[in-house]
Image (cartoon, helix red, strand yellow):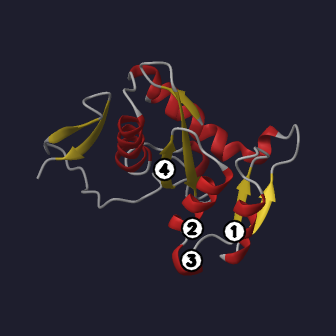
Amino acid sequence: MQVYDIWFRPLFAFFVIDIKSREVIYVGVKRAPTEQSTAQQLRNITPFGEGPDVIIRDRDSKFGTEFDRVAKGAGMEVVRTAVRAPLMNATCERYLGSVRRECLDHIIILGRRHLAHVLGIFSRDYFNQARPHQGIGQRVPVAVATEKFIAGTTIRSVPVLGGLHHDYRVAA
């Protein structure tokens, strides 16, 4: 995903999503990604060969032979998206749209570290733990311990990203 900072310099976000649970597992940000840097990010998130069985990637040159070699070395099958087949990468496209509409359209990004921070909070605290997902039956990807609501119980609002979104929980 390409994003521009306040000085109109491009930033690129690299992310990994579990298709079954819709959980965002990893988000990384680079100023100018290369084939070597995307391969290194894949190495970082698959230590000791632990990782998904299949990885779906697009046909961008940033995901070249070295990326494929690292994935195969970690025991993953690499599937490249077909040309003109937008539904093949629907989970990724849905996440991109959600991040843009619900987060980046409302925040001015100052730089690489700021974008990494914002995407980390959005993905970890809101997208994974509070936002219901239509594709998985209005559940959240990472089930948090939820208290049962009883009539008369106080509800508290937990702001996410400085109040851009709120998560509502039973007050302790």
Q: Nearer the viewer, mark 3 or mark 1?
A: 1
Query: Mark 1 or 2 closer to N-term?
Result: 2
Picture quadrant where residue 6 is located: top left
Residue 104 vertical position relative to residue 120 in the rendered view, above or below: above
* Amino acid type at mark 1: Ala
Q: Is residue 146 visible?
A: yes
Residue bearing mark 1: 71
Q: Is residue 41 left or right of residue 66?
A: left
> In the rendering, at what x and y percent does residue 11 appear?
52, 33
Amino acid of disc 2: Arg
- Mark 3 burial class by Cα count in 10 Å: few <14, some 14-19, many 20+: few
84, above or below 144, in the image: above
Q: Amino acid at mark 4?
A: Val
Task: State yes or no: discs 1 and 2 in contact (Cβ < 8 Å).
Answer: no
Mark before the other along the chain sequence, 1 or 4: 4
The residue at which mark 3 appears reads as: 50
> For the residue labelled by badge 3, is the local secondary structure a helix, a strand or a loop?
loop
Q: CA distance from mark 3 to mark 1?
A: 11 Å
Choose top left, top right, bottom left or bottom right for residue 117.
Answer: top left
Which residue occupies 45% across, 51% down?
Answer: 140
Give whichever of 28, 172 is nearer the camera: 28
At horizontal 79% and vertical 47% (from top left) the residue drawn is 88
Residue 71: x and y, percent?
69, 68
Mark yes or no: residue 75 visible. no
Q: Earlier in the sequence, mark 2 or mark 4?
A: 4
Q: Which residue is mark 4?
A: 27
Inter-mark Cα distance, 1 to 4: 17 Å
Q: Residue at x 56, y 47 (%)?
A: 14
